[in-house]
Image (cartoon, helix red, strand yellow):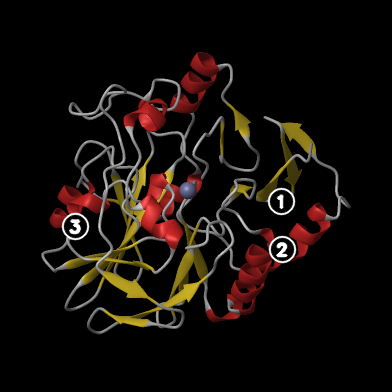
Amino acid sequence: MSPHPQSLHLLGTLILVAAAPCIAQTRCEAPRNPVFAKYDKLDITDGWFEVYRLPGGVYALFEPRQAEQVFSYLIVGEKRALLFDSGFGIGHIDVVVKRLTPLPVLVLNSHTHYDHVGGNFAFSEIFGVDSDYTRKSAQGKPNSLMADMVSPRLTCPPLPADVTPENFSIRPFRVTSTVFDGQRIDLGGRQLEVILTPGHTPDALCLLDRAQRQLFTGDTFYPGGLWLFVPETDLDAYQHSIERLASLASSVDVLRPAHNLPEADPRLLAKVAEALPQARAGKVPFTIRNDRRVYGFTVFSIVLANPK
Ligand SMILES: [Zn+2]
């Protein structure tokens, strides 16, 4: 996600929010995608998150009332649990996590854009990439940059009682352990493999659960408009990463993305790997939105900067 979002990566296409009040209302009243009905929605919440039980000891922690439609995932082993992203920091993800597991919890971020690190401050064990980008993100983001994220334009009421556009910020956090490519994180009875996938950001990574045949893709892939236009995005690196992920697609049955829906078809990774060079070469039609080029494909679109 971008530090200055004027549009949202919602399903299929990018939806403009310039005409805010009326579109926001439509969004708040939109029916939930039928995919959600496949999963048990638990009666556990802090009033902000919705929690869905996924197969294989995984919980999806969803923020339906913020326009970015962010998912974080709690992956539970026998000895400890891993929280893959900590959301916006609007709700109290630590409270939700405590209600889901008594085990110690380590946090690993799919990348450190603010919509995925907002709850980090509430945890003491945080794994992260050794990069300048991560260190900068760990300083948090002030209210002056974050106020709009909780404005009526981008949220559906009610906000948690302690959150207002006047006080909301991304709080700083401290990475306590560095992760490396190929690292296996042992949760007791289950191992998760770290796959560094720079591109969307320099510190983007995915998490592979070979035994449960699922791949947690963060913002490297989700159904919707793939944001590849911000300064910290490296398109060559992204291409390499998405090709690498596509080569793993046969090892998994499902993707667990960080936006919009809690599942996606692994075969889409190869489609993105194929689509991006076409978009970059100008071989497919695009529309201009918010001064960005949106290349539409089935299930996803590619959003690139519009060269001046
Ligand atoms: Zn994001």
Q: 3 or 285: which is nearer to us?
A: 3
- Farthest residue to the left: give it: 102
Q: Looking at the image, is mark 2 or mark 1 nearer the viewer?
A: 2
Cα separation, mark 3 vs mark 2, equals 37 Å
Where is residue 154 drawn, in percent x and y? 44, 27
Check the image and report above or below for 212 versus 150.
below
Residue underneath mark 2: 271
Circle 3 or circle 1, nearest the eye: 3
Look at the numbered discs 2 and 1 and tell me whether their residues touch, using CB distance below 8 Å. yes
Number of numbered labels in the structure image: 3
The answer to whether residue 285 of the structure is visible from this angle is yes
Mark positioned earlier in the residue sequence (3 or 2): 3
Q: Which residue is mark 1?
A: 298
Q: Is mark 1 within 8 Å of ligand 1?
A: no
Q: Residues within 10 Å of mark 3 (few under 14, many from 20)?
A: some
Residue drawn 49% across the image and 27% down it: 27
Going by the numbered disc 2, the residue's amino acid type is: Lys
Q: Secondary structure at mark 1?
A: loop
> Of the numbered discs in the image, which one, if any, rests on residue 123?
3
